[in-house]
Amino acid sequence: MQWFKHRKLSEVELAGGPSSRSEALAYYPEKSSEVLEVELETGEIVLTYPLVLRPWFLNLARRVGLRSKEPLTRKLQLDAMGSLTWTLLDGKHTVQDLVNHACHRYKLNKREAEVAMTGFLRELGRRGLIGLRSPQSQEPAKPT
Amino acid sequence: MVFSSQNSWKILAWNGVSLRVPPQWEVNSLDTAYLQLDDGMGPVMEIKWRQLRGSFSHQAHLRKLAKLSAAESNLNFQQIPLPEKWRQALSNFEAQFFKWRGLKIGGEGAVIYCTSCQKATLVQFYHKSGRDDPSVPVGVLNSLRDHSEDGRVEWAVFGLRAQIPERFELLRHRFRPGHYLLVFRDGQERVYLSRWGPAGVLLEDGDLQSWFEKECQDFRWCSTLGLRQVDHGGTPTLQAQSQRSDKFAARLWARVTGKLPHFWVRIWHLRLHNQIMGVGARGLRPLGEPWLEEICRNYAMV
């Protein structure tokens, strides 16, 4: 017997996302308003973002007195390429624009730039640093 | 979809099979003898091949495909005579045509056998809408080559171009952002093709030698102490070569320890493409330079 079942996404939920690579590349990445950024002298950017913990873990930590009320934060230092990409996340550039920029700036193969860029954005999204806005939506993105 | 003139099509070559495809098509998935291409909207073409030793039966393979399609509900598989244009495009091969139609997507393809190299190939093109240009599959098949005529196998994927002597087989490959690696084997000889990038970022804090010695994790088997700068038409280039004994006792010791004592490495900075290229070779015996020079000459980015 399986104790923890992963919930399968319904067709309606799946229909809300992009159905092809070109559609996914047309999305607009936007920074989360909860992220603080500091630029170092080297030009690299350090991001400070709130750590998202599961509610049951937070409750448990509070009850046993392991946690103060101040929000927990984490820091992430981006390298030169990551910092440059971060500065372009203004909600006006699509993922495709970022890929084209990386291709042009670093003379990368298009597919290589796509894989690198989407991997980087996925990692930022996983940490809640960015959200993706669909081309049809006018609302600002929520962190993923 | 409207395609530009076939003159602008790009070459795709992988493990003995080469073809020309529209510039929008990119490799989506690849394995030792398999390629899937994508046009940004989804898969458009698949090709897989196998080197055979015995006889080949088109009918047996088509029966297998029909059986596979029967397992899928709402899939209509048909074996029909080869269209005239396909017949002309595949005149160098023995080929059988098939077509299938599902609920949302369909496809057509061919089971191909080359009598001169005994390679069997299965190729299929997907039809997502009724607006697919029928001249595209014909153009692709027209350019299909499954063996080389000059003893060198061409490789052309993700902007990388190379030619490797036919005697080498692909041992492993890796395509990650920033690093490509192809490893070939022929008996006790290995050839390594590497590409690192972007060079502007990798060489930000030093030159090619310091990057290779401190940062590069590949070609660790070559002695970095032996690396020397060589002149290659103004291209920053490093080269190293083993100076070990080729006596019987040394070879025996190498066999016992499982190490390949002789090596040859060349690393160069391709400024035009902002990449660092590397060719390495290892073997039980001293490595002949002329064929390695030829690999380096034909190893490039496009």
Image (cartoon, coloured by chain):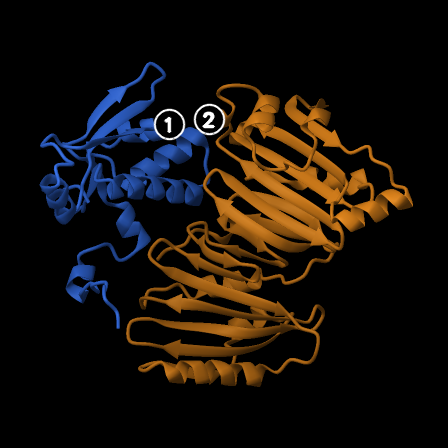
Chain colours: A blue, B orange
- Residue at the top extreme of this rendering: A41
**The C terminus of chain A lies in quadrant:** top left
Question: Which of these two is toward me, B220 or A135?
Answer: B220
Secondary element at image label 1? loop
Find the distance from the CA under tag 2 to the CA under tag 1. 10 Å
**Percent coordinates x, y for residue B273 in the rendering:** 52, 32
Give the label, 2 or 1, closer to the camera. 1
Question: Which of these two is toward me, A89 or B298?
Answer: A89
Residue B20, numbered circle: none
| Residue type at tag 1 | Asp
* Any part of residue B187 in sight: yes
**Percent coordinates x, y for residue B43 in the rendering:** 39, 61
Residue B201, numbered circle: 2
Mark 1, residue position: A79
| Residue type at tag 2 | Val
- Give me the residue at 45% from left, 63% from top: B45
